[in-house]
Amino acid sequence: MLFASGNGTNAENIIKYFKEKKDVIIQEIFTNNPNAGVIQRAKNLNVPVSTFNKESFYNKDEVLTRLKQIDPDLIVLAGFLWKVPVKIIESFNNRIVNIHPALLPNYGGKGMYGMHVHKAVINSGDRKSGISIHWVNEEYDKGDIIAQFTCPVSENDTPESLAQKVHQLEYTHFPLVIERVLHGKYKV
Ligand code: GAR
């Protein structure tokens, strides 16, 4: 089960990775954004997509009800930008993972997503960035870290070039970490 809000290149990469494997099925993609690139990507790969709005996510429990029907082993946030409601977190305790495009605990929290993160890293002058894959709890980007991978930041890097480096790390490592989590190789 994947959640995504935007372009969906991570979602596509994860779907392609697990299409080759027989023991993991990506049941459905959920998105809050009816214009998200992830919708076409999922359709191209024959994965069902559901869109939802704030009302159905936060007030009407429609997403929660659907998740309970599916009862996935793992919910993966792959570029998902809304805060997950506490009811969903409580119902799927230690079954939700997120990817963040920097080395948490730095550059996390509300408003820190996508290019905002890479701009902040470049402006700080840090010579290292990377990705953090972590469990999701009630606070943005504060759940326990499962795995981190780093890349160098050079003086010539721009937010755009750093975003590319970080995306490459995501494509290489995120599916493998998901697989290891599903096989119980990372302790909760
Ligand atoms: C990814 O870099 C992901 O780490 C980031 O959004 C991008 C989505 O790209 N997630 C966050 O910033 C969450 N706070 P994609 O839609 O092409 O996969």
Image (cartoon, rainbow, N blue to C red):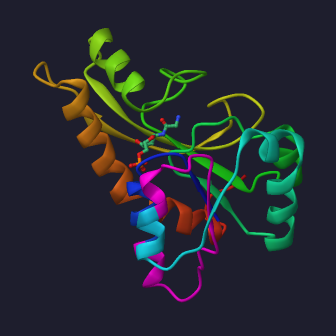
Residue at 69% x, 42% y is: 136
Task: Decide which of 43, 128 is in the foreground and name it.
Answer: 43
Q: Is residue 149 left or right of residue 85?
A: left
Q: Quadrant of residue 160?
A: top left
Residue placed farthest to the front in the image? 35
Q: 145 above or below 176?
A: above
Residue at coordinates 24% horizontally, 41% vertically from top-left?
165
- The residue lying at 74 percent from left, 39 percent from top is 54
**Which image quarter: residue 24?**
bottom right
Who is closer to the viewer here, 19 or 55? 55
| Residue lying at the far left of the rendered structure | 156
Across and down, in percent, residue 146 comes to 58, 47
Question: Which residue occupies the foreground of this view, 143 or 56?
Answer: 56
Q: Outermost residue toward the top? A: 124
- 72 magenta-colored: no
Q: Image quadrant of ligand 1? A: top left
Return the x and y of residue 124 as percentages of the image width and height. 32, 10
Q: Which residues are magenta?
A: 16-39
Q: Quadrant of residue 41?
A: bottom left
Left or right: residue 182 versus residue 122 is right
**Residue 102 in the image, given as x and y percentages of width and height:** 42, 31
Left or right: where 102 falls relative to 87: left
Looking at the image, is 144 positioned above or below residue 21?
above
Q: Could you say where residue 7 lies in the image, as x and y percent from the top left?
A: 40, 50
Split into 4 quadrants, where in the image is the N terminus? bottom right
Taking the image as shown, residue 69 lies to the left or right of residue 31, namely right
For the point 66% across and 38% down, the residue is 144
